[in-house]
Image (cartoon, rainbow, N blue to C red):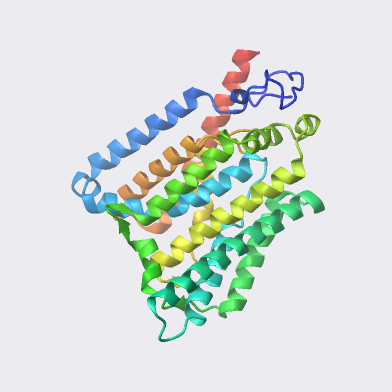
């Protein structure tokens, strides 16, 4: 199997062998340290430019409500990128599932509903959204594994498909008037901790367990590093990919549920900028775009770095269009730096 650093192939080792080591598929500690330093530098820079605004309690509270959404998208993107693919449909899935959930809560909920009835319809809406997200993810996985279409083309097509379906269901209008009990998910706090942040922490924990405590994580990284070798190692590539895109769809659905709770409305075109941000976070967090490895800790640090930068730019009253320009520049710079770093490592080994 070819190592991620480009060194000479090594003999294939079965998964069950005691000599198999997952460390070879993970980023080097130096990249994690570098990312941590970048996060600290960005925080210090933004704090130095606008300390009164950036370091205020309101600013940190606002951050805690903002970054969990694109953090969930980044986790979904990370899993598919580790497999050697990508999922460009996550925002489309989020909007479609949020519309399904909102429809259940608003259009089916009786006008004079009691608190118990409201809770029941909220649970039905959440379950419906998660099921639809799972189906959308499985559809992506089926097209990739069974039909053989490249992931970037599949998810580019399904992005438009899910968005079009969402527009058909709503006729281009927003669904508003969700139960007040549900909006606390997006805008409420448990003690002093925002509920969206708690949900993001649960997603982090679940993703970490999958990648580091379950055989699925080892199989996924082997698949991304070398699909042919993973087959000879006893990995069912089709099953792993189906599971990966299914999890990605469910994470996108959870993000959609948070968005609709924060905005008290559901629409087909919310969050279009989240795709670029999710890719940026994944690449910045150390996920190899070619597949093979990635760390949840890297995603968390990259999410915080991007949020610090975004909040600092907001404090400076920088427009959204300029921020989109900066995200593109940062993404290109990160990819160039990572490529130079990989080539330097390859030369040292050679």
- Residue 16 in sight in this render: yes
Q: Spot the residue most to the bottom.
A: 111
Percent coordinates x, y for residue 139 in the rendering: 71, 58
| Quarter of the image that includes the C terminus | top right
Q: Say whether residue 165 is left or right of residue 341.
A: right
* Up/down of 233 relative to 141, above or below: above
Q: Nearer the viewer, residue 56 or 153?
A: 56
Q: Say whether residue 323 is left or right of residue 232.
A: left
Q: Quadrant of residue 172?
A: bottom right
Q: Spot the residue most to the front.
A: 116
Q: Quadrant of residue 51?
A: top left
| Quarter of the image that includes the N terminus | top right
Q: How many marks?
A: 0
- Residue 67 in sight in this render: no
Q: Quadrant of residue 194?
A: bottom left
Q: Spot the residue most to the left.
A: 52
Q: Say whether residue 262 is left or right of residue 162.
A: left
Which residue is depicted at the point 48% across and 36% down? 298
Which residue is depicted at the point 64% across and 27% down? 4
Percent coordinates x, y for residue 211 in the rendering: 58, 37
Percent coordinates x, y for residue 159 in the rendering: 63, 61
Q: Nearer the viewer, residue 41 or 205?
A: 205
* Up/down of 345 relative to 181, above or below: above
Which residue is depicted at the point 62% across and 26% down? 22
């Amino acid at each position: 199997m070819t190592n991620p650093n480009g060194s000479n192939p090594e003999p294939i080792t079965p998964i069950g062998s005691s000599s198999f080591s997952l460390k070879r598929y993970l980023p080097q500690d130096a990249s994690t340290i570098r990312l941590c330093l970048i996060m600290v530098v960005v925080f210090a820079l933004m704090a130095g430019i606008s300390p009164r605004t950036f370091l205020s309690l309101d600013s940190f509270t606002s951050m805690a409500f903002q970054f969990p959404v694109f953090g969930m998208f980044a986790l979904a993107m990370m899993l598919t990128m580790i497999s050697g693919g990508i999922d460009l449909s996550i925002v489309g899935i989020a909007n479609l599932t949020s519309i399904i959930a909102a429809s259940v809560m608003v259009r089916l909920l009786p006008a004079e509903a009691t608190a118990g009835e409201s809770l029941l319809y909220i649970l039905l809406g959440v379950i419906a959204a998660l099921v639809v997200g799972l189906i959308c993810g499985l559809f992506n996985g089926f097209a990739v594994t069974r039909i053989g279409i490249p992931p970037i083309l599949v998810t580019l097509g399904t992005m438009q498909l899910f968005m079009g379906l969402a527009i058909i269901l709503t006729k281009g209008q927003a669904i508003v008037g969700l139960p007040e009990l549900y909006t606390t998910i997006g805008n409420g706090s448990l003690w002093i901790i925002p509920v969206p942040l708690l949900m993001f922490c649960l997603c982090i924990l679940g993703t970490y367990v999958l990648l580091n405590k379950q055989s699925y994580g080892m199989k996924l990284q082997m698949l991304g590093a070398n699909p042919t070798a993973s087959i000879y190692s006893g990995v069912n590539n089709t099953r792993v990919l189906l599971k990966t895109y299914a999890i990605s769809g469910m994470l996108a659905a959870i993000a959609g549920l948070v968005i609709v709770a924060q905005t008290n409305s559901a629409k087909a075109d919310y969050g279009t900028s989240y795709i670029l941000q999710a890719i940026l976070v994944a690449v910045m967090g150390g996920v190899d775009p070619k597949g093979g490895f990635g760390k949840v800790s890297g995603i968390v640090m990259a999410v915080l770095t991007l949020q610090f930068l975004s909040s600092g730019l907001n404090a400076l009253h920088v427009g959204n269009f300029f921020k989109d320009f900066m995200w593109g520049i940062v993404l290109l710079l990160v990819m160039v730096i990572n490529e130079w770093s990989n080539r330097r490592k390859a030369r040292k080994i050679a």
